[in-house]
Image: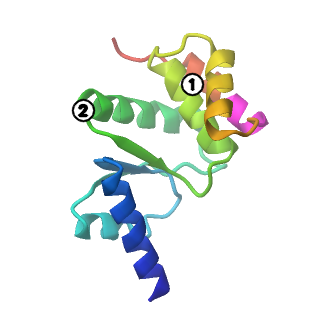
Amino acid sequence: SHRRVRRTEEIVWIKAQGFTTVVSTLAAPHNLHAYDEADLAWRHVPFTSVDDSSAVLGKLYPEMRALLGAGERVLLHHNEAGDRLQGVVAGYLVYAGLVHEPARATAMVERLLQRPMGPIGRELVSVAAKLTAPT
């Protein structure tokens, strides 16, 4: 089917870019088996608008930190590159101590994705700033 071909093309692209692990924040685990078939590591940390942001980020960020610390190249996958994904990425920069000021992390991700971050993303950065990363 067209979708299977497209999914295969996406996985080929992901691997060609050097990514070694996909972290999916999609609500459902659909198509994660395709990563198994392609011998691509993945993690599933569902994150929807009804989930407790602090709880999800408290699980997601240590997982990402461990993967990155082990030398993995992580692709963060969500429905779209919108506010939620922007907030998760900017929040991680603050959580991991890579950027100390939430406003600076927000501005960096806005430049990276070439779009302003809305209130949902900004709230996630605020939540992330309150989480404590292990040293």
At which x and y percent is residue 83? 69, 42
Per the image, is 120 magenta? Answer: yes
Q: How many marks?
A: 2
Q: Residue 105: horizontal and vertical position, in percent? A: 61, 21
Q: Is residue 135 magenta?
A: no
* Residue identified by numbered label 1: 128
Tell me the colour scheme of the image.
rainbow
Identify the magenta region: 118-124
Residues at badges 1 and 2 in contact (C-beta under 8 Å)? Answer: no
In the rendered view, would you say 84 is above or below 102? below
Secondary structure of the magenta portion, mostly?
A: helix
Percent from the top left, x then y, of residue 69?
A: 27, 27
Which of label 1 and label 2 is nearer to you? Answer: 2
> Which residue type carries mark 1?
Ala
The disc labelled 2 sits on which kind of residue?
A: Gly
Farthest residue toward the front?
Answer: 16
Which residue is identified by label 2? 71
Tell me which residue sits at (47%, 16%) in the image: 98
Which residue is depicted at the point 55% across and 10% down?
100
